[in-house]
Amino acid sequence: MIFRIRKPIEDVWHITVKHNGKANWYISGKHQGIDLRTRCESHPNGIGTPIYAVADGVWESAKYNRMMGNTVTLIHGEYKTVYGHLSKTNFIPGYSKVKAGDIIGYSGESGLMCFGPHLHFEVLKGSVSLDPELFIKAGEDLVNWSRSRAVMKVEGKGAIKFFIKDGFVNITEKNCWKIISKNTWGISNNDYKDLLNLI
């Protein structure tokens, strides 16, 4: 399964420092992850913008890091995502699972490596930092593909509709294979699960 993810911020999308961009504050001189602007119409000072889990997973940690401030780390199978410089986290003791689109915290400017409100966002596989933009683009491509299908339409979070003889029906994990296998081609079990994770 390709690790396709949604954006961690919905209100604004602007990358201020790219993955492997020049970052003198790292020993390697390369930026691990991407930095995202958090200033938006509802939060003009950049603090308090909702930050979303980019995929289903489980909480690994929500703790204060001297350099990254309030930091959330989520586990998604063989991948991890990291969200840094938060003003606060939404971790609830006793809860381990997180769903794509859950608010896991709010933007801030915590930590010594923060020079103004923003979100530091990383995708890791093992200990290797990967470019989050590639995974976000893969997710957007899958949603756009589903929307381009004449027989499919996506209607908000969690709703995929499929056109059959009697009109559009909701696709669920239980009925999707019966419906899709009879009416179209090109979507796999993993594609479907990824798509549910993104909308």
Image (cartoon, helix red, strand yellow):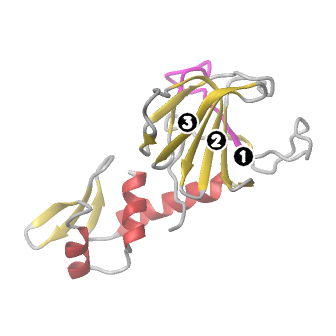
Q: Amino acid at mark 3?
A: Val
Q: CA distance from mark 3 to mark 2?
A: 19 Å
Q: Which residue is mark 3?
A: 12
Tag of residue 148: none
Could you say whether the residue bearing mark 2 is in a helix, strand or loop? strand
Q: Is residue 21 left or right of residue 145?
A: right
Q: Nearer the viewer, mark 3 or mark 1?
A: 1
Question: Which segment is the magenta one?
Answer: 33-49
How far apart marks 3 and 1 lie (CA) works out to 18 Å
SS under mark 3: loop
Sort mark 1 into few (<14), some (14-19) or many (20+) by Cα contacts within 10 Å.
many
Give the mark, 3 or 1, whose residue is nearer the N terminus: 3
Residue lying at the far front in this picture: please name it. 94
Mark 1 and mark 2 in contact (Cβ < 8 Å)?
Answer: yes
First in sequence: mark 3 or mark 2?
A: 3
Q: Residue at x 20, y 75 (%)?
A: 178
Estimate how packed mark 3 is, as few (under 14), some (14 to 19) or many (20 or more) residues with alpha carbons within 10 Å: some
Please name the residue that numbered disc 1 is placed on.
Answer: 33
* Residue appearing at x 87%, y 45% in the figure: 22
Residue 121: x %, y % from top left: 65, 41
In the foreground, 15 or 159 = 159
Instruction: Give the percent coordinates (x, y) of residue 76.
Output: 53, 52
**Kind of residue at badge 1:** Gly
Q: Which residue is mark 2?
A: 82
Regarding mark 1 in the picture, which secondary structure is present there? loop
